[in-house]
Image: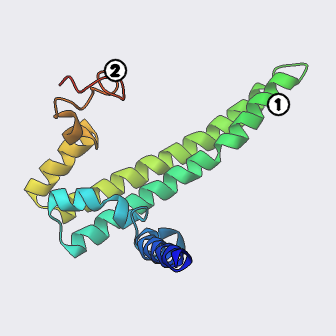
């Protein structure tokens, strides 16, 4: 009898886990919390955006992310150039200048992408939404969390299993 109950509980747990896993389907290409739309969900809710505005914001974020990934991909080559310059008998500044030129080109491309994306977003949003988004960008994404008096209690050592909240 106990085996049937245990088996039923395991089956229920497995079904619950599988059902819950569908929410986090972004790695399969679905919409989940780690998809571009899922990561921006907080911004969309705060700005009260329409689906058309969301599409423009997601595209702008993807463009900037793609340009930044190109720059991030150059990091390994930069480290190799630094190591090569240090290994030689004579310091090789030419290799470093060549690597700097590649970085400068990618940084300039990133700047242009950011400027174009910001222009698209500015055009898509109304004045209230632009003001809200500007505040989010200026203060950071976690600004609303810092207004709570207990927000920094954990880092200040005023909570945990030994202490109590001292907010």
- Rendered residue at 35%/28% (across/down): 160
- Rendered residue at 56%/76% (across/down): 3
Q: Residues within 10 Å of mark 1 (few under 14, many from 20)?
A: some
Please state which of residues 117 and 72 is positioned toward the viewer in this rendering: 72
Q: Residue 7's mark?
A: none
Left or right side of 121 for 76: right
- Rendered residue at 28%/61% (across/down): 41
Left or right side of 93 for 23: left
Left or right side of 128 for 118: right
Please state which of residues 45 and 165 is positioned toward the viewer in this rendering: 165
Question: Looking at the rendering, which quadrant does residue 75 occupy?
Answer: top right
Q: Is residue 43 above or below residue 21?
A: above
- The mark lying in front, picked from 2 and 1, is 2
Secondary element at tag 1: helix
The residue identified by callout 2 is 157
x, y percent for residue 143: 22, 38
Q: Mark 2 or mark 1, which has the lower sequence index?
A: 1
Please state which of residues 45 and 159 is positioned toward the viewer in this rendering: 159
Numbered-mark total: 2
Whether residue 77 can be seen here? yes
Distance CA(mark 2)–CA(mark 1): 46 Å
- What kind of colouring is applied to the model shown? rainbow
The residue identified by callout 1 is 84
- Rendered residue at 16%/53% (across/down): 130
Whether residue 29 can be seen here? no
Secondary element at tag 2: loop
In the rendered view of the protein, which quadrant contains the C terminus?
top left
Please state which of residues 40 and 122 is positioned toward the viewer in this rendering: 40
x, y percent for residue 18: 48, 75
Q: Residues within 10 Å of mark 2 (few under 14, many from 20)?
A: few
């Amino acid at each position: 009898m106990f085996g049937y109950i245990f088996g039923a509980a395991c089956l229920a747990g497995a079904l619950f886990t599988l059902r819950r896993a569908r929410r986090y389907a972004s790695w399969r290409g679905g919409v989940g919390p780690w998809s571009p739309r899922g990561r921006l969900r907080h911004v969309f809710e705060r700005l009260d955006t329409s689906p058309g505005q969301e599409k423009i914001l997601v595209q702008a974020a993807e463009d900037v992310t793609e340009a930044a990934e190109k720059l991030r991909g150059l990091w390994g080559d930069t480290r190799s150039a630094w190591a090569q310059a240090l290994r030689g008998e004579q310091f090789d500044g030419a290799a470093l200048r060549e690597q700097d030129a590649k970085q400068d080109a990618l940084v300039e491309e990133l700047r242009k992408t950011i400027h174009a994306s910001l222009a698209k977003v500015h055009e898509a949003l109304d004045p209230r939404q632009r003001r809200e988004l500007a505040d989010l960008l200026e203060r950071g994404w976690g600004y609303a969390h810092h207004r709570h008096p207990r927000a920094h209690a954990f880092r200040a050592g005023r909570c945990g299993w030994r202490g109590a909240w001292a907010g």
